Image: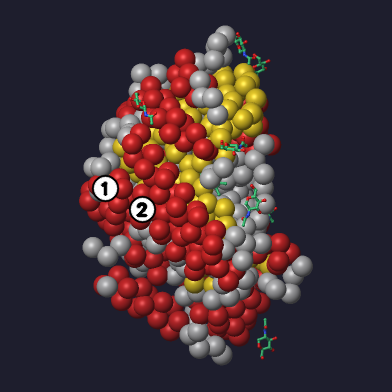
Amino acid sequence: MTRTLFAICYLALYWARQGTALLSHDLLDVVSTYHGPSTLADQITKSSAEIDDTARNATSPYGFAATQRAAAVCAISKVIFHGDVYTNSNTQYTTSEDINWSQTCWLPAACFIRPQSTIEVAVALKLITVTGSKFAIRSGGHNPNPGYGSIDGEGVLIDLQDMKLLSIDSNGTVSSGPGHRWADLYEFSQDHNRTIKGGRTTDVGLPGFYLGGGMPFFSSLNGLAVDSVLNYEIVLANSTVVNANRDENPELFRALKGGGPNFGIITRFDIATYPVIRANYAVNLYNSSDYLNILNATAKVLSSMDSDPNVDFYVSVTPTVVSIGMFYADWLAEPPAAFAPFNELESFVGPMVPLENGTVASLGADLAANTPVYNARRVTSAISTKLDPELYIQHHEQFLKTVDAAGLEFAANLSYTIQPLSSAAVKAGNSLGGNALGLEEITQIWWATVVEWTDEEKDSQALQTIKTLSDDLSSLAEGRDDLLQYEFMNDANFMQTVLDSYGRDNLALFRSVAVEYDPFAVFQNLQNDGFLLRKIKS
Ligand SMILES: Cc1cc2nc3c(=O)[nH]c(=O)nc-3n(C[C@H](O)[C@H](O)[C@H](O)COP(=O)(O)OP(=O)(O)OC[C@H]3O[C@@H](n4cnc5c(N)ncnc54)[C@H](O)[C@@H]3O)c2cc1C
Ligand SMILES: *[C@@H]1O[C@H](CO)[C@@H](O)[C@H](O)[C@H]1NC(C)=O
Ligand SMILES: *[C@@H]1O[C@H](CO)[C@@H](O)[C@H](O)[C@H]1NC(C)=O
Ligand SMILES: *[C@@H]1O[C@H](CO)[C@@H](O)[C@H](O)[C@H]1NC(C)=O
Ligand SMILES: *[C@@H]1O[C@H](CO)[C@@H](O)[C@H](O)[C@H]1NC(C)=O
Ligand SMILES: *[C@@H]1O[C@H](CO)[C@@H](O)[C@H](O)[C@H]1NC(C)=O
Ligand SMILES: *[C@@H]1O[C@H](CO)[C@@H](O)[C@H](O)[C@H]1NC(C)=O
Ligand SMILES: *[C@@H]1O[C@H](CO)[C@@H](O)[C@H](O)[C@H]1NC(C)=O
Ligand SMILES: *[C@@H]1O[C@H](CO)[C@@H](O)[C@H](O)[C@H]1NC(C)=O
Ligand SMILES: CC(=O)N[C@H]1CO[C@H](CO)[C@@H](O)[C@@H]1O
């Protein structure tokens, strides 16, 4: 409440200064604190008259409506960033709009601003705070929640896809801009004889993935992906650029390890890598009608993860086909014994990715090559439970009932994925310094449920369906004392609050870090939507 008032006063102050202060001076202040290339400063100096003129023209005749503030940011950005701003008069506007994984996120922003450097991000954010415009940030665009990495005409979208720094230090630390997707990082690390912990779908962007913790291949070795981040370069709400690591801004560093988009805009990740992992892998397809044996086998393989950290897998279930990814972090002469329960299943239909000796990079590439990509509207949900085959079976039977009911209502694909996390993975993360997710040191499953549909008129049925699926799973799990509090942000939907599932201490950390680094609550009040602290009630 107080912070909201602060934010309003802060914005009012800026508005009151319009007409007296020169915006170009503010922008030069931002640029002067950053020791980067001076071309932007030159450009602002050269265009200062036009910037100030545009600021006066664009802001003063307008009232306070969101669309007008956004229009002001777009108009001024066009002077400063030239061709890197797309409004609906540009041919690139539609391709910028239709980029995200879920069509529910194809939203018509007032403009798409594509910064080319950290300092441009800082300047763009300054324009946003000066005008009080709403905004959203997009990197890989894979988050399916509408309004998170997307925004309608009431605000501007900062699209970081051009920020493609990529380098490696002699000690194996990789530095990456936010514009990369995992395919780039896997290939680059492999070329330098290193393995990086990243997404299992190589098309996913780094920032959203890391902000939720990041489920990598082989989590029992070196923990979750975020446990390997050594440093974040981040643009704070007041457009200052800082580093956050174990020594500098350590509390911000910890909050970024799972705390979502509450603290600033990340412009660089410095990431620890590891000697090349020799990965033996296969993805096999099974007939879902054999779910009793498949899910029983799943529980057996899951329990073997604690004694063998080289084991990793997932089980992805549709009403007709189950695909099981079996990954082992070494090349063995015989199929790994840990996967015997899967390999013995009689319902094997055929391979999706044939058994192969490769690396994490080739595994990511082979999975991508064998995964169909198509546009659809999508919503997901995240629930965590303990190891319990009886729960998996009861859940599957409930799932089939919901599939039948949904089939009568509309054309949709319903599926769920069982993602294992061993207690060894949680311990490995803790030994690397830990994160802010508040995970229990037990072997667990992170369920990701997905509803996919195409007809916009069926949005409400789709939401009702995902809600039914996740409510059913959580009440079944609760009844069996299997439900874990933790919700995995990367698979969660906008009806889930997530940050309050990390435990009281982590939530308190997020709140204190947000107050310290964003005292006027810019990321809470002006950011369009996201897994934000403003949504947590208590
Ligand atoms: C097909 C598919 C496969 C997936 N596989 C995995 C997997 O194996 N493991 C896993 O952990 N997750 C996985 N995910 C989930 C994925 O990690 C999340 O959807 C994640 O949010 C995507 O990040 P992004 O950068 O691509 O998304 P975006 O939609 O661009 O951003 C996501 C969120 O982060 C914010 N954000 C983006 N960039 C920045 C930045 N630079 N600074 C601050 N905030 C920022 C956005 O505002 C938004 O709130 C998968 C998702 C899909 C669709
Ligand atoms: C600002 O408005 C004035 C007066 O209407 C006009 O002459 C000038 O060209 C405008 N400047 C810009 C940058 O739009
Ligand atoms: C690797 O080198 C970078 C830059 O020289 C340094 O910041 C980092 O701390 C080093 N990392 C390790 C793990 O030694
Ligand atoms: C990676 O390893 C291969 C084989 O050992 C070697 O030929 C190559 O030079 C190495 N590459 C780098 C960048 O170190
Ligand atoms: C799966 O099993 C069912 C029931 O035995 C059968 O009808 C179906 O054809 C099988 N599907 C495949 C892909 O083998
Ligand atoms: C699952 O496996 C256990 C032994 O691990 C066995 O007792 C049980 O009957 C199996 N359940 C099914 C449905 O196959
Ligand atoms: C993988 O490598 C091991 C050891 O080098 C070998 O015995 C095995 O046959 C290989 N497997 C495949 C599928 O190539
Ligand atoms: C369901 O999935 C198939 C691919 O497996 C795809 O072709 C189809 O379009 C999807 N249907 C919907 C409604 O999303
Ligand atoms: C910007 O914000 C940070 C964090 O709140 C603060 O430490 C710093 O002094 C501020 N910088 C300026 C120039 O106000
Ligand atoms: C512009 C762009 O990248 N669009 C992509 C949106 O997502 C679908 C997959 O769902 C891709 O096919 C498009 O290329």
Tell me which amino acid carries mark 1: Glu
Up the image or down, 442 lies above or below 137; here it is above
As drawn, is 359 to the left or to the right of 492? right
Instruction: State the image coordinates of residue 34 (x, y, percent, origin top left).
Output: 52, 53
When asked about the image quadrant of residue 499, the answer is bottom left
Residue at 41%, 21% (x, y): give it: 309
Instruction: State the image coordinates of residue 10 (x, y, percent, origin top left).
Output: 37, 75
Where the C terminus falls, by quadrant? bottom left
Where the N terminus falls, by quadrant? bottom left
Q: Is residue 136 visible?
A: no
* N-terminal label among 2 and 1: 2
When asked about the image quadrant of residue 394, the answer is top left
Q: Is residue 444 or residue 76 the one in the foreground?
A: 444
Tell me which amino acid carries mark 2: Asp
As drawn, is 533 to the left or to the right of 25? left
* The furthest residue to the right: 91
Q: Is residue 74 or residue 334 the one in the foreground?
A: 334
- Measured Cα–Cα span from mark 2 to mark 1: 10 Å
Up the image or down, 456 lies above or below 274; here it is below
Residue wearing tag 2: 472
Residue at 68%, 72% (x, y): give it: 87
Q: Is residue 85 or residue 486 the one in the foreground?
A: 486
